[in-house]
């Protein structure tokens, strides 16, 4: 791998970086991105934005490349009804100990994705005080739908909030001290979809329009050997359950087939196939295994609708 962060050499700290040094720095970031960074793990592209967003694992790759040490300094801004942290991350050269710059990140349990969770049942929603419950509209593949939500407890998400603030601060300092903002954006993936569209701006490239769903013309190929039990069913109902853990928010999609059985998946692409099949009135071929929480979908594919078939 060629190039180096020449501006961080001891002798160059006393002078301005040359154009060649800045070019070498950007080239090295791009080379690292192409050689060792993977889309979806180290960075990701949000539709409508001109640059990919840098993720925490990607920032760690860049910091390691340039031999930069970081030190997070946490400020607790929490109150009884809110978990809130601000983190300043200070960067120094591992070789010289020279201070290179800092980044700041903040997170709060008042953010939309942390403040609310789906009610477990109607009884929980009804028993929750009115100021700590709501019904909100969501956007789905079959159109808008409404779900009942209740407020989370700040203590339940405090550790996640702290980690999110630290992550945002780390990415900020990475972009700042390495000039990686030429290549990456920050934090857009943390925003709700509606705000992502606003942040992308009118001048950003627009994602291609989704094609109109056509009824499937070909049957799905057979699942690979060892994929599990295979069934072919119509899609009677689809329900989504959301939650939160240390890795961030998650969504589980439960597909109820014409056989009355429910099959679950955390995979967004599999969920979309099920939704497309339901909208088209088609059947799906599902291979599944019995897991801890029910039937876990391994593969799913749309098949021709069989006249009069409901299995």
Image: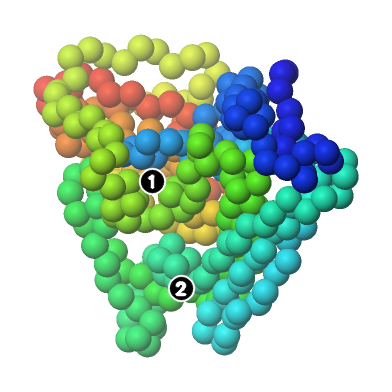
What residue is shown at x 67% (from left), y 64% (from top)? 88
Quarter-of-image position of residue 271? top left
Please give the residue where the numbered disc 1 appears in the rendered image: 253
Residues 290 and 240: in front is 240
Rounded to the nearest angstrom, the CA distance separating label 2 from label 1 is 26 Å
The residue carrying pointer 1 sits among few (fewer than 14), some (14 to 19) or many (20 or more) residues within 10 Å by Cα, namely many
The residue carrying pointer 2 sits among few (fewer than 14), some (14 to 19) or many (20 or more) residues within 10 Å by Cα, namely some
| Position of 161 relative to 19 (above/below) | below
Circles 2 and 1 in contact, beta carbons < 8 Å: no
Q: Nearer the viewer, mark 2 or mark 1?
A: 2
Q: How is the image coloured?
A: rainbow
Residues 145 and 52: in front is 52
SS class, disc 1: strand
SS class, disc 2: loop
The percent position of residue 2, horizontal first and vertical second, equals 72, 18
The percent position of residue 29, horizontal first and vertical second, equals 62, 30
Where, quadrant-wise, is the N terminus in this rendering?
Answer: top right
Name the outermost residue toward the front.
15
């Amino acid at each position: 791998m060629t190039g180096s962060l020449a501006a961080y050499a001891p002798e160059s700290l006393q002078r301005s970086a040359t154009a060649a040094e800045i070019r070498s720095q950007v080239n090295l970031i791009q080379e690292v991105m192409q050689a060792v960074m993977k889309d979806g793990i180290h960075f990701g592209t949000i539709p409508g934005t001109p640059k990919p967003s840098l993720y925490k694992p990607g920032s760690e790759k860049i910091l390691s490349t340039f031999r930069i040490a970081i030190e997070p300094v946490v400020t607790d801004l929490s109150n009884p009804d809110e978990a809130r942290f601000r983190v300043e991350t200070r960067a120094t050269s591992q070789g010289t100990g020279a201070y290179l710059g800092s980044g700041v990140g903040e997170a709060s349990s008042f953010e939309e994705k942390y403040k609310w969770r789906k009610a477990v049942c109607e009884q929980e929603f009804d028993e929750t005080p009115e100021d700590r419950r709501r019904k909100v509209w969501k956007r789905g593949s079959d159109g808008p739908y409404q779900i009942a939500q209740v407020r989370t407890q700040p203590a339940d998400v405090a550790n996640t909030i702290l980690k999110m603030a630290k992550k945002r601060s780390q990415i900020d300092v990475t972009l700042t001290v390495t000039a990686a903002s030429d290549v990456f954006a920050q934090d857009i993936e943390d925003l709700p979809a509606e705000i992502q569209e606003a942040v992308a701006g009118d001048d950003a490239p627009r994602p291609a329009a989704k094609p109109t769903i056509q009824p499937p013309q070909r049957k799905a190929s057979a699942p690979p050997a060892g994929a599990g039990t295979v069934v072919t069913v119509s899609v009677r109902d689809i329900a989504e359950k959301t939650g939160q853990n240390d890795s961030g928010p998650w969504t589980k999609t439960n597909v109820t087939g014409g056989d009355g059985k429910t099959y679950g998946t955390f995979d967004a692409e599999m969920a979309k196939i099920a939704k497309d099949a339901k909208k088209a009135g088609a059947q799906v071929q599902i291979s599944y295994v019995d897991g801890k929480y029910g039937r876990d979908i391994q593969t799913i594919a749309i098949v021709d609708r069989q006249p009069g078939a409901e299995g």
